[in-house]
Image: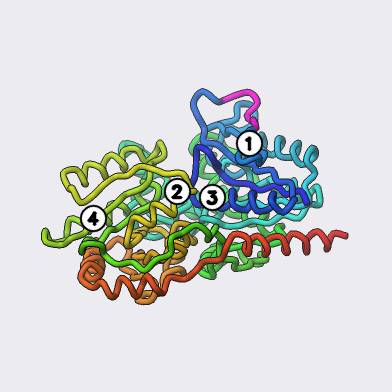
Amino acid sequence: MKVVLSTHVFLPEFSGGTETLVHGVALALTQRGHTVVVVTGYPPSPEMEAGDRFDEYEVDSIRVVRYRCGRTLPGLETNTVRLQYVNRSFETGFRRLMDEFAPDVVHFHHLQRLSITAVDVCREKGTPAFLTATDYWYICVTQTLLLNDGRICDGPAHDAANCLKHLAAMRPKSSWAARTLSYVPTSAVGVGMSWLKRPQKRYSGQLGNAQALAQRGKAIADRLLLLDKMFVPTKFTQTVMERNGLRGGRFRVLPFGIRTQGYNRRIRRAADGVLVLGFIGTLLPHKGLHVLLEAMKRLPGTSRVELKVYGSAPEEGTQYALDMRMRASGDSRIAFCGTFENPGIADVLDGMDVLVIPSLWHENMPLVALSAQAAGCPLVASDIGGLSDVVAHGENGLLFAPGSSAELAEVILRLSADDDLLARLSSQAVTPMDTECYVDELEAEYRDACERLN
């Protein structure tokens, strides 16, 4: 079987959850004798605004076709908002790949930096197409369903009028759009967005961006209905997506799989009375490292707790990462340990007693949480969608109110004072689905779809 997998970014430069998932699936399929091509995006750069945007390389003998997206496409598309979900340049290259490779199945894991119209190409070719939703890009232009003040957003409303206000507010304070829109009721903005949403002439400039935003939801939802199946890691993810207009799709809840071998699964106890906490994640605000650092500050001076921070920041998070280091400066209990290659995660987890996931957004199903469980490492996590599907409070971990550094500090103190609780949570860690079992499920879905065509 020939299979195309897609992701928004990929190894070796990027090694987040989606990239790791795709890599694991690609390896497993290849080892079973299938031929796999990974199609990936790449962040735009100022110097890359014209010419052939496709190049190729290999990762572990897997062919990777990379599309370097631009902020605009001179002669094709200058609307920066529409280009995030409809990219005719990528669509043309993807169609060329489909003709050359002739896959039996296409499995999208992300379409950011690519194009939702890749689904149209699969439909034209009669190729079964699947999608795994690893975040909320399909309903939220920022992916996170988070407002600027850190509160969770329920999703687009009034034809994405609230999204328009949100994006405007993200601009510098001097922006006239931000100042004006902040005073206009969302329902009133929605009247204009409803008018812009209707098929009519294309506008340019800021009005054109608003129009593209108003039309985004339907453009994506219509394509998702064409998929053979859409996999989601939790029922919560499905509920959020259905609540935001993605109804009628062929959903299947399929928890992510990881390589479960190689972990030193042991019962955690605070060695020498020191509780070692760990944070593993991208250094961006929605991951909540600042909440954890504030909780550390709240601990009494007599508490014996250490924190190891693993992760780095993408370009847009540079200032946040610097701020986090400044907050921790002078605190000998906190160490920033940089990043590590994914195969090294077992050793990293072996060096901590508890993994803390203080996220502010609806995580889908973080692979790092599954890895921690495979190692017998208890979880302390925000009581928020996705995470609360992985953590059973009081059984394999503890939950706290999202954003509450005070509550998190109480949880940390509780664990540092009760070694038996730490051991019990560790002993009840849930073994996640192995990648091989996960790919068994995918392979069966692929074969069923192909058989239906014959």
The answer to which of marks 4 and 2 sits earlier in the sequence is: 4
Kind of element beneath mark 2: helix
Kind of element beneath mark 1: strand
Q: Would you call the spot at circle 3 few (<14 residues within 10 Å), some (14-19), or many (20 or more)?
A: some
Inspect the image, locate mark 2, and give the three-letter code of the amino acid beneath it.
Answer: Gly
Q: Is residue 43 left or right of residue 174?
A: right
Q: Would you call the spot at circle 2 few (<14 residues within 10 Å), some (14-19), or many (20 or more)?
A: few
Q: Which residue is mark 2?
A: 344
Inspect the image, locate mark 4, and give the three-letter code of the amino acid beneath it.
Answer: Glu
Residue 326 at x, y percent in the picture: 22, 42
Asked whether the viewer can see residue 269, the reply is: yes
Distance from disc 3 to disc 1, alpha carbons, whole Å, reads 15 Å
Q: Are marks 1 and 4 in contact (CB under 8 Å)?
A: no
The answer to which of marks 4 and 3 sits earlier in the sequence is: 3
Predominant SS along the magenta part: loop
Q: Are marks 4 and 3 in contact (CB under 8 Å)?
A: no
